Amino acid sequence: MDVNVTLATWSNLLIYSAMAVYAIAFLLYSSDLFAGRTLASSGKQTASGRAGAKTNAKAGTPVRTSRNSSVAVLDREDDAETADAGAAEAETGGPEEKATGASGTAGRRTAARMATALTVLATGLHVAAVLTRALSVTRVPWGNMMEYALTASALAVLVYIVVLYFADIRYLGTFVAGGALVTLGLCITVFYTPAAQLVPALQSYWIWIHVPIAILSTALLSVSAILAIFQILKARTEKKDTVTGLARMFNRVSASEAVEQLSYRIAAVGFVTWTFTVIAGAIWAEVAWGRPWGWDAKEIWSFVVWVVYAAYLHARATRGWSATQVAVLNIVGFSSLIFNFAIVNVYFDGLHSYSGL
């Protein structure tokens, strides 16, 4: 089958377009994240102030209607968060945190809302780039490293958007948009491979089963690892009486326990899908090469990734491991996953040499 050069060119243009929108979203997310919250010098509130805070916490504040229901939900969460923080500080008599917007008054995190909308737009362009790449060669869009990274990064952002619908994790936006931007940059430069047909070894129906699950696993585990990083940093700031400097940005982040719980849930799903990836790979190897396991470099490192994440799940269920130590193990697992993709595929000889580089 011939390659449709026009569609392949459109795919590249869509990648550049998505990168431009991701870059703007990255800047807006960074502006929101690093703005954080400032600590006021006021002490305890008066009785009337405490009553007002509680009333506001219960009643909430009016929310402007929006065409995007998920953005409206986030707006209500921002208002409720501000009211709840005021009520909690009134009860404890500690320093009062006030959300500050561009004008210096309590706001709706306009930068974060704009960044989220742009991320959705960039994701649309990103997915379109994947689809046009697939249509240009009339096959699955994961036949080499470029296409794998292109598809996995799109799915990772989609995971972020889906989770965002249920929980306000916009503090991850800086790293999600930034990570997608870097990945697309690598796809169009270091990993770039001209559109072409699959090599004979990959022309099997198993490429519709084994590789997509591996891509889904990569997307899930990448979001979980970013959450683990935030969990560790947030836990450090929670131990301090005052928050200053760059640590102030973590006032946007939920409590470390909540972040850890979300990171664990996503990693648990990612572990299940990665387990299926390893099993499906062994079955495909049996079909293609007459043996399910041959100590190939890719097979070994895929198993190493599985072992590290199995240790992560075991450590979380075992007494004696702190939340920070478990999070570090999560990050080690993701590092082994990246090593498996970026290093083993390029520099290790074996039967799985399908990087296209």
Image (tube, grey):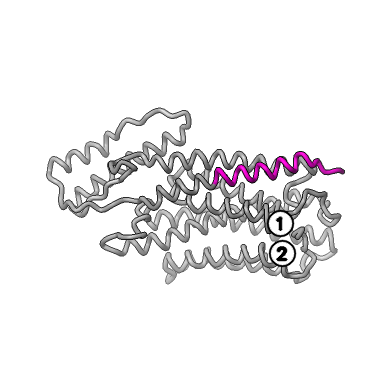
Residue 173 rendering spot, x and y as whole percentages: 48, 49
Q: CA distance from mark 2 to mark 1?
A: 8 Å
Write down the quadrant of residue 295 in the picture.
bottom right
User: Depth check: 118 or 205 in front?
Assistant: 118
User: Depth check: 103 or 341 in front?
Assistant: 103
Quarter of the figure with the N terminus? top right
Q: Please determine whether, in this image, residue 200 is positioned above or below residue 73.
A: below
How many numbered marks does the figure carry?
2
The three-letter amino acid code for the residue at tag 2 is: Asn
Check if residue 17 falls in the magenta segment. Answer: yes
Write down the quadrant of residue 200 in the picture.
bottom right
Q: Can you tell which mark lies on residue 145?
A: 1
At x 73% / y 42%, what residue is drawn?
9
Quarter of the figure with the C terminus? bottom right
Q: Please determine whether, in this image, residue 19 is positioned above or below residue 288.
A: above
Point out the stretch of residues depicted in magenta.
1-22
